[in-house]
Image (tube, rainbow, N blue to C red):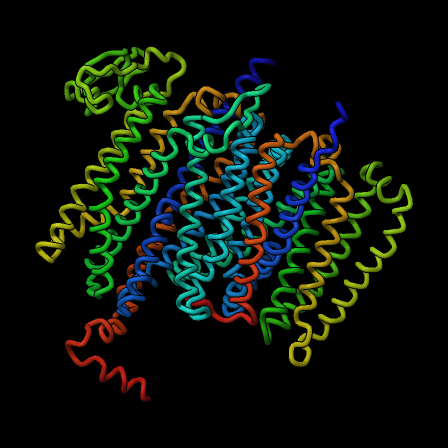
Amino acid sequence: MTATPIDWLPIVFVGLMGLSFLIYAILDGYDLGVGVLLPLDNQEQRDTMIYSIGPFWDANETWLVMAIGLLLIAFPKAHSIIFQALYLPTALMLAGLILRGVSFDFRTKAPSHDKKKWDLAFKFGSLLATLSQGYMLGRYITSFEDTWLSFGFSALSAICVTAGYCFIGAAWLVMKTEGELQRKAAKWAKYTNVLMAFGIIAVCITNLLIDQQIMDKWLGGIQAILIVPLTFLLGFTFITVHRYLGKVPMENDLGCWLPFLAAILLFILCFCGLGYSFYPYIVPFHLTIFEAASSRESLWFIFVGAAVVLPMIVGYTIFSYKVFWGKTTKLNY
Amino acid sequence: MLDASVIANDTSFMLSRIQFAANISFHILFPTINIALCWVLLFFKIRFNQTQDDSWLRVYRFWVRIFALTFGIGVVSGITMSFQFGTNWPGYMETVGNIAGPLLGYEVMTAFFLEASFLSIMLFGMDRVSNRVHTIATVLVSFGTTLSAFWILSLNSWMHTPAGFEMIDGVAHVTSWLEVIFNPSMPYRFMHMLLASGLTTAFLISGISAYRLIKGDNKKSVKQALNFSVVLAAVLIPIQIFVGDLHGLNTFKNQPAKIAAMEGVWDTETHVPLLLFALPDEETRENHFEVKVPNMASIILTHDSAGEIQGLNSFVDKHPPVAPVFFSFRIMIGVGVLMLLFSWFATYQYVIKKRYPTWLLKAGVAMTFSGWFATLAGWYVTEIGRQPYLVTGVLSTKDAVTTTPPENIVMSLTLYLVIYSFLLIAYIRTLFVMANRAVILEQSNATLTESGSSIEPQVPLTEEGAK
């Protein structure tokens, strides 16, 4: 008998799962961000902001189900450990997601004097969800340790993730709206962009300090050179976007998509950084993807389906974005 | 020390069960409406395409908004469900994850994305895409919701009647996906649920339409919706009774302990009577105050008055709690009978008498949510009836529960209960607000377009347009 070769299925599935989390963070990120940014003093702008995400939020949130589903399907042991450890923040996040999801529909259908209350529920539901997600990410990165350092880091992460979502949300609005709201969105994007930059620096430093293994992975060899271009890319993106935002709107709305594209790039970079830090662990430093993986026959069964269905999903997602392309207008049933 | 942890674990167990029951009971209300409502909307749309009669479009537009609201609540409460496995029932995925995982995965991949992506085109895309594409989007959303029901009911049925697997070191491994997906109770449960959805939707539509009629909303579209829904209910209810009976026979074959609880049979015997009412007592293991029809249970289940039914006493410690199953079953049947009476009488009124008496309309309003009661009662029969197992014969519910401390579960449970009660009230209230608004809002518009060619409505309409 030869030695068992490395099973590639868990690697494929951790890739698929990571991709789903990343797509979720980008897509639901912008609509959560728009929710957090809702201005309490301007009904008309609230309407436009919500119209801008109306056709998309539902499919966006499905990526969360997909990501959590893949974790559940491919790495059931990890799913159990993670969600028992994150029991309360999960419940809070769900409460937030429920509140904002239903407010969307209720706000236009409930008695009109209740509309503002539903908008409030939308805003604070979104905020609760983003804070919880950031907190959960922080707890995950610090291996769910019950130390003050871990809790403090998680609180910081809650704020940074919220800032990140607000940034991508504001960038979305710069792209999808016009006039006063667009100028306002550019201002929001500018502030949250700075906050997010500080957040990323803080997370990077803490991440390196928190565990020797991660430190070695980044700085313990030739790969440390990579840090130079990465830092440049990050810095360049931040500064370019910051300067562009100061000039919104440009003539003919030139480059209104630029901040959103930059936000996507930043999300991808951060995500890959985290992924690199922790691979091959699925529960940091406790459980690897190979130890947590489901049986081969089950993974194979799902893989075949995924190979057929995922391209179709991408296809009709693009179709849906094309149908609602361009600047936001009122949504009519 | 040990005692304390055992007690904490018992409390976590009960709380987790209550939480799961609360979550799934709340969640199922909304898909139950939407699985069928979507097909009904497609019907309205197609009728409009065929007749170009604006009142069909009006019915469509009114109900598509309710569909959107219902869908939104269904989605977010469904997301909550997907987390429950990990947070509260880790043993479930650890034991049968190889089966549950892929089935859930296929639901997300083939159904959820399809529904979610085309929903926005169906809801907001009428002015943005061609009528044809819009109709196709509606078909795809309908297909998606039904497909989603297919996968989740397949998994649920597998938990009742597991097949196509082998246990290796305490973990289930699949031997045949076909047997897993089409396990013995799956076809029956799937049909039973689709029909339940059809009935729930039919009664929702007839209830809200009857309410609008009572409020003086005489638009053609309201009557169209009412007529359609009572006929739909009248057609579906006998089919449902037939399928329900087949489902019962299937359960009798595969889960005899559940049937024994449903029928309140303690000892294995022949010539078993059908209990119309009784108070089952698990302490003394007998029934009080029985009202019965002799031999009837034997006849229904075995088609033989001398047929033998296994009693609860042959499944000691392995049968479900009797009273909840027994009563839920009778509530489901009772609501079903009411549905039959109402829908057949209303159809008679519509077809023969061509008018609905006011008391019948009021009865219709009272039955707006009757489908919810029957569906929930039915699910309680089948799910409580599966206890003490999570997966029949494979995994006990108790063995799957979390080690999360009870305090945490108390907090999350309270949070869910508060949100859910609030949303349920808001949902019901909003439906009637929307109905009231429709009565007033479209009135002027309606008199112009809906009174048809009989008077001269076109004249002011064109003048208005000329200006």
Q: Left of B348 or right of it: where is A154?
A: right
Q: Position of residue A73 (x, y in %)?
A: 58, 36
Towards the viewer: B157 or A91? B157
Count of marks overlaid on the render? 0
Q: Left of A230 or right of it: where is A144?
A: left
Towards the viewer: A309 or A192? A309
Residue B417 against residue B451 in the figure, above or below: above
Q: Could you tell me which residue is drawn at 39 percent across and 58 percent down?
A: A110
Q: Quadrant of the N terminus of chain B?
A: top right
Q: Could you tell me which residue is drawn at 74 percent across and 28 percent down?
A: A4
Q: Left of A39 or right of it: where is B265?
A: left
Q: Position of residue A283 (x, y in %)?
A: 70, 34
Outermost residue, left side = B353
Q: Position of residue A171 (x, y in %)?
A: 65, 64
Q: Left of B28 or right of it: where is B445?
A: left
Q: Position of residue B414 (x, y in %)?
A: 48, 37
Residue B314 against residue B396 in the figure, above or below: above
Q: Quadrant of the C terminus of chain B?
A: bottom left
Residue B217 appears anywhere in the view: yes
Which of the 4 image quadrants contains residue A198? Answer: bottom right
Residue A40 appears anywhere in the view: no
Q: Could you tell me which residue is drawn at 17 percent across and 45 percent down?
A: B342
Outermost residue, front side = A1
